[in-house]
Image (cartoon, rainbow, N blue to C red):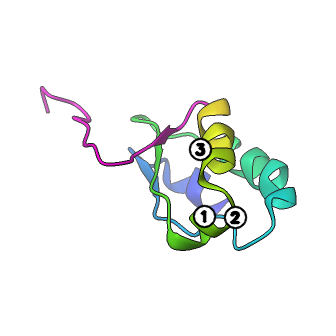
């Protein structure tokens, strides 16, 4: 609720989204999907995400329309 109230330009989730059990992915994805930001949602995988299963987490993130940054960058708004 706090994140929604501040109306962010960009949401960045900086890793360790799921500690060890991929069974929590649907719950986490629904919570993340409920957030909005003008420039979208970007995630970066942490070591715990790799322990859990990076491919599963990447699929869940991309399934809700967010981006996963793996060895790449992105221009948010070139004209800004």
x, y percent for residue 61: 62, 42
Image marks 1 and 2: residues in contact by CB distance under 8 Å? yes
By secondary structure, the bulk of the magenta-drawn segment is best described as loop
Q: Is residue 35 left or right of residue 30?
A: left
Q: Residue at x 59, y 34 (%)?
A: 62
Comparing 8 with 69, the one in front is 69
Residues shaded magenta: 65-80
Q: CA distance from mark 1 to mark 3?
A: 9 Å
Look at mark 3 in the image and give the residue it sits on. Answer: 58
Q: Earlier in the sequence, mark 1 or mark 3?
A: 1
x, y percent for residue 9: 38, 44
Comparing 1 with 58, the one in front is 58
- Quarter of the image where the N terminus is located: bottom right
Numbered tag placed on residue 52 in the rendering: 2
Q: Is residue 79 left or right of residue 33?
A: left
Q: Earlier in the sequence, mark 3 or mark 2?
A: 2
Comparing 67 with 49, the one in front is 49
Badge 2: residue crowd in 10 Å (few <14, some 14–19, many ≥20):
some
Numbered tag placed on residue 49 in the rendering: 1
Q: CA distance from mark 3 to mark 2?
A: 11 Å
Q: Residue at x 21, y 35 (%)?
A: 75
**Label 3: which secondary element:** helix
Q: Is residue 55 above or below residue 40?
A: below
């Amino acid at each position: 609720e706090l994140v929604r109230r501040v109306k962010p330009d960009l949401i960045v989730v900086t890793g360790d989204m799921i500690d060890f059990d991929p069974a929590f992915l649907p719950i986490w994805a629904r919570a993340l999907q409920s957030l909005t930001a003008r420039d979208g949602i970007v995630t970066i995988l942490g070591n715990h995400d790799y322990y859990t299963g990076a491919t599963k987490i990447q699929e869940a993130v991309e399934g809700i329309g967010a981006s996963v940054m793996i060895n790449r960058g992105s221009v948010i708004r070139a004209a800004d």
